[in-house]
Image (cartoon, rainbow, N blue to C red):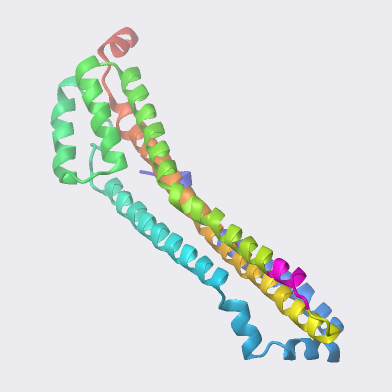
Amino acid sequence: MSIPASHRPAREWLWLLVALAVVAALAVPFRDVLTGQEARKDWAKWDENRLTRLFIGPEQVLCYVCAVWAALILQSRYREVIRQRRAFGMGLLPTDEGARILPEDARPLARKVEQLTSGRPYVLANMIRLGLGKFAISKSAPDVAEVVRNQADVELSRLVTGMATVNYLAWAIPAIGFVGTVRGLGGAFGVKEENIQLFTDQAKDQLKIAFDCTLVALLLSLVVMYFIHALQRAEETLVTDAQQYCQEHLLLRLYDPARDGTNG
């Protein structure tokens, strides 16, 4: 069996390395030109207290909780995708050249699928089982193709629905960051001090809270959204490959008496 196109690596990580190399080659010379004594003074302001306020705050902690929660859900779903991939190597259908599936073979093959999977849920096994069940009843290859296609849509819908919590967390992270931004801005405008220097210092502290919350939240959101995208692509590819497997080893091997009799 040839490797499906969806199984072939897209070499995205290779292109990422190329992009990093190009950006570094352009950015490093500019950095050397633009950085100077003033820039070093700015970096010196990031002391321990400044970093603590940047990374540890009520809004930041909530963002961390949401990000870790989402990461745990994503890793469990990715492990499920890996488990589902094992079904392609179980020999659920005959792969010999020229093998045909007759209507009377459908139910024995369906029982074989049940035995090989030991009752565990597999996307591929479920498509094959439903297709064979339909073929045993209707003896029509187009009906089987329709069942497989409908089941693929059901599986995709189930996968999309299962991402509801993760999608909410991905939305909640920047929203929490903006809550911190509003709190910081509100504190800055609510400062009441007659001493101008004290007023300025307190207002600047509140503005730092506002921008720090937004910075941390947006960075976490970018990371979480990337892994959501990667997982969704892996799940969609799983269903697509299951359809292709059924196309090659089930639909194209079915013996349809009406169709094959007409061709004969």
Residue 206 painted magenta:
no
Identity of the residue drawn at 34% across and 55% down:
82
11 or 31: which is nearer to us?
31
> At which x and y percent is residue 134?
25, 22
- Vertical comparison of 112 with 26: above or below: above
- Say left or right for 177 vs 169: right
- Vertical comparison of 171 with 250: above or below: below
Identity of the residue drawn at 17% across and 43% down:
119
35 or 23: which is nearer to us?
35
- Vertical comparison of 87 with 67: above or below: above
Image quadrant in which the N terminus is located: top left
> At which x and y percent is residue 221?
58, 61
Image quadrant in which the C terminus is located: top left
**Magenta residues, start to end:** 184-192
Location of residue 173 by image quarter: bottom right
Residue 187 painted magenta:
yes
